[in-house]
Image (spheres, rainbow, N blue to C red):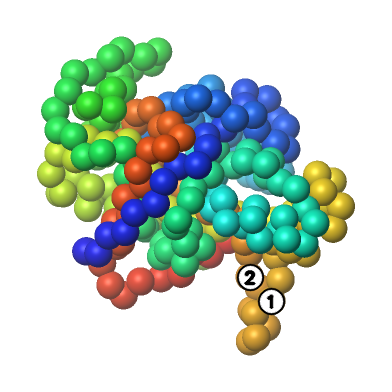
Amino acid sequence: MSAEHGTVAAVSRNDAYTFTKPNRDEIVLVAGFGVEGDIHAGVNVRHRGRVALDPTQPNLRQVHLIHAELFEEVAGKGYEVPAGGLGENVTTSGLDLLGLPRGTILRFGKSVEGGAKESVEGGTKESVEGGTKAGETDENPVGLVLAAAEAATLDPATARAADAVAEAVRRDADGGEDARPAIVLAGLRNPCAQINGFRPGLLKEVIGQDERGDVVRKAGVMAVVLRGGPVRPGDLVTVELPPSPHAALEKI
């Protein structure tokens, strides 16, 4: 398994359906659920358009990440986009998020071991010292997300994403006692026309085609929370790649 590092440039959340999300000093990840206090947190799909189509779908879009380098790129074309401006929860720096394979685990903060749990509504989560161990379904609802995936009718890309999450849960459980908050990358955000409502003309800068005519989506990646805990600006982000062969992220 190879690793690389980046940093957290900003964190954002909102408890209401808005296109942008305000920056925070800290967000708290909850395993199998998402960002505590965020409107898109939940076991089943939370994005309104997807809820309208099928509310039984699993929520593989619990955490939205965008690389800060995208904002630098579009700034050169006249578009000012602040962190959280496209609705992401975590803005990263120094990571090629879009180039990471499906099933990649991202861990936040310095590696620590042990620690005590603190109680939260509806169960327990552990502090950054303790984390939340994926695979323990009595305390960790990742299993509920996977159960929702088993029960729902999934399109092929979503089914592959769910399989990658399940494999990452097994890998994380077998990997020892790394206590850091962690997420697993499930797929790509599919940019929509709302982006033009935020900045007219911006949509064409975050979705296009490569030289082969394949669609290129730049508006970030979606993830499921494996282990809970706080994430703050300046935190180290450690990349853990899945076993080879690697599969590219697909829209979900």
Q: Which residue sits at x=35%, y=43%? A: 236
Are the residues at dot 1 and dot 2 in contact (C-beta closer than 8 Å)?
yes
What percent of the width, then of the height, locates residue 88? 59, 42
The residue where tag 2 is placed is 216
Q: Which quarter of the figure has residue 103?
A: bottom left
The single residue placed furthest to the bottom in the displayed view is 212
Dot 1 surroundings within 10 Å: few (below 14), some, or many (20 or more)?
few
Q: Which residue sits at x=47%, y=62%? A: 96
> Which one is earlier in the sequence, the residue at label 1 or at label 2?
1
Type of the residue with mark 1: Gln
Horizontal side, residue 33 vs residue 52: left or right: left
User: Does dot 2 land on a helix, a strand or a loop?
Assistant: strand
Between 59 and 4, the residue placed more toward the observer is 4
The residue where tag 1 is placed is 209
Up the image or down, 193 lies above or below 16; here it is: below
Type of the residue with mark 2: Val
Horizontal side, residue 164 vs residue 173: left or right: right
What percent of the width, then of the height, locates residue 231? 41, 32
